[in-house]
Image (cartoon, rainbow, N blue to C red):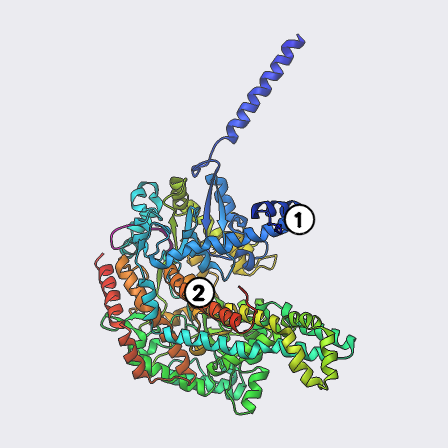
Amino acid sequence: MPVEITARKKPFRQRLRRDMRENWVVYLLLLPVIIWYIIFCYLPMFGIVMAFENFKFAKGLFGSAWVGFKNFQKFFSSYYFWRLLRNTLTLSIKDLIIAFPAPIIFALMLNELRSRKFKKSIQTISYLPYFISMVVVCGMVKTFTESTGVFSQISQALGGPKELISNPGSFHGIMITSGIWQGLGYGSVVYISALTAVDHELYDSAKLDGANRWQQTLHVTIPGIMPTIIIMLIMRVGHLMSVNYQKIILLYSPATYETADTISTFVYRKGLLDGDYAYAAAVDMFNSVINTILLVTVNWISRRKSETSLF
Amino acid sequence: MAKKLIALVLGIMMLMTVAVSGIAEEKSDLHIADDVTLRFFFDLDLAANVPGMQNYNDSDAYKWLEEQTGIHIEWIHPASGTSREAFNLLFASDDMPDLIYNSIPNGFVYPSGHDMAIADGVYANLKDYEDLMPNYMAIVNSNEILKRESVTDEGNRWCFFYIYKDGRGPNFGPTIRKDFLDKVGMDLPETYDDWHEVLTAFKEQLGIEIPLYVNKDTFMWYSEFAAGYGVTKDWSLNTEGKVIYGPCEDGYGEYLDMMQQWYKEGLIDQSFSVHDGRWPENDLLLNDKVGAFPVYTSWTGHDYYAKQGATNPDFNLVGTKIPVKEGGEAHYRMPDMLTNTYCIAVNAQSKHLEEAIKWMDAQYSEEVAFVMNYGVTEGKEDGSYYFDDNGPHWGGLITNNPDGLTQGQARQRYTTNNAPYEDYNRVMGTWTDIQRETQARLMESDYSAYISDSITMTEAEQEEFSDIMGDITTYATEFTVNYVMGNASQTFDEFRAQLKSMNIDRAIELKQAAVDRFNAR
């Protein structure tokens, strides 16, 4: 009778210890990051308790009275609830549809360039806006879109609104356009590196089959970087509900609350400016719950349709 | 023999050292304690406003005070723009400072109210320490209004108020460029129609970009242009003494219609939602782009802005009366103040509670108040104060600072701009005629519509009130801005109906109850 010799793996702890001994430098490098996550992401989670309390600083997190879902009810019955939800979702979805593909298209276009020098210089120029501080960018945007600014003048000449920055209808456009301008170059880096990983032999065999440039892009390039695109998409969905609130705060005003006020900016006003911490915590928690549901859903869909998923 | 000589010399030297140290040990009457450091949260970005100063310890007056009392103060000044958040965070941290600046009109108050601050054990109830604060109590008890304002409905004394010795008239109001007025040959506007003519002339004849500057969130800080319609942007009293919420009243609708008309004609800053300062930024103002805006009386005239770099040598800012309807009156303006907006609360759990109270109280004594107001160096030309037949005045160090500091900056450096017991006469003594006239004009409208900042509500009332007003204030601001810009999606009557459905009447009731209790104190 043949004897089966199966090699069993050593138990997990032993393997871990051995790995740590051999690669301790890597673990050391990882340590600060883990500490950061524990302190700033996991520990504050206990603050969620605040959302269910009538929080008073003097009584503290565990001494304040428990009120259950009262803060949430206050939010759902707020005059502005539907508007906030609507603005958050429309701004995020528009951003996703318009701003997400932009770096991908840009990377594909760059890929077509023959001259290396030209390609490199375009890439570098496109990175630069990313490094300008958001506050400075918003200052510039406001100057260009106020009633005496360039874009508003163009808009007036074309018969559009007199001033863009205070026009609720143009707010989303301004947010997304300035976002693309700032993030295009930097965002395309991931895709450019993914493009270099597509196997050249696939291109050769496609050419042999008689595919032209456009067909090659459609059938070789895009499927080649699809895993990257999917992962980036899932991560993007993770930010959907918090949709860049710092930039909104810098650009909005009571004139544009109608389209600009989102759940996160509302939380900022109520929580930090008015000091109503429990209410703000409840609203923010609602925001996070919705976001998590979206994230898990998108991840599940992508796991089913393709084999790529984040978790 | 030599030994005896040495012994004698040594003996004399010892006697001398004893005598000298005896003189050095004579402490001032104001001495409170040694080696005590008090932490004081005060909202003032000195480093940004005054060159050479990091905090109040760099001011001559406070340096003198430290020498006299022996108490060192560790100042906590939040960076400009972050003060509201810094204030709220104080209560959430474990080590609150010993002394905390509060300001009711600016929203720096304990979230659930002063009585709760005491009940929660956060602020000390100064009522229990009145024997440690003789100077302050003497001042407060000498005036009926002060007595009422300085305690809560329950009789708790929650803070030290900064007090004006002889009161202070309104110091903020509408101002207009007199040099522009002269160019178009018009007089100071008094009624709304006057203002309309003047602003139109500015725009059409002089080509001014921003005839009237308004603020994006509040429109006008003290509702200067709404007062003539009998309303303000939020709470006031009507002519019968009842509490009203401005946006609910008919007058507010008329006010909005007027503003909307003015905006359409280009008389109001077209980009006001982007220009979000309380008054215009220097680059607009100094380049003659602004015709009129509300600002401090002391900034009128020529000199203040000339120092800031005004390019136009004729620059002349003059204050006007609160605008009224034809033949009408305005009953609202910034009130005559007995108290400055600053209130200093003492941390109930401070380890140096008594020292903190005594230190604050010392600043209300004659001797210390004088130094805080006038500084330590005497001299008409190069000192910070001098005396003449009319009393003390500021000296050359302040009015004509050799290092090029403006008066406001010099005041911070050598005295202090806002002393706890302030003699406002020193400020008015340095005023030019223009400023005095501005003040006089402002005094022509009374402030009977004004609701005191010192009214208080109970915790439950305060919560209910904040819940109701939270959404309402956003709604009212938004509607106002959109209506003026011509983008309103509702009519004024629909707006009012909506306010009613948001329960504004209950909020008015609550406010009225608080006012009634205040009047009964």
Above-or-below relation of A99 to B364: below
Residue A117 horizontal side relative to residue A219, left or right = right
Q: Name the mark nearer the viewer: 1 or 2.
A: 1
The amino acid sitting under disc 1 is: Asn
Which of marks 2 and 1 precedes in the sequence?
Answer: 1
Above-or-below relation of B120 to A236: above
Above-or-below relation of A234 to A66: below
Residue B381 horizontal side relative to residue B245, left or right = right
Q: Quadrant of residue B454?
A: bottom left
Above-or-below relation of B248 to A12: below
* Viewer-nearest residue: A257 or B34: A257
Q: Is residue B157 magenta?
A: yes
Task: Tell me the element at label 2.
Answer: helix
The quadrant of the rendering that contains the N terminus of chain B is: top right
Which chain is mark 1 on?
A
x and y percentages locating residue B138 in the rendered image: 31, 47
Q: Which mark is residue B22?
A: none
* Viewer-nearest residue: A289 or B282: A289
Q: Which mark is residue A288?
A: 2
Q: Is residue B288 visible?
A: no
Task: Tell me the element at label 1.
Answer: loop
The magenta region covers B153-164
Looking at the image, which residue is at 46% across and 66% down? A292
The quadrant of the rendering that contains the C terminus of chain B is: bottom left
Q: Which residue is mark 1?
A: A23
Q: Is residue B342 magenta?
A: no
User: How far separated are the C-alphas under marks 1 and 2?
Assistant: 37 Å
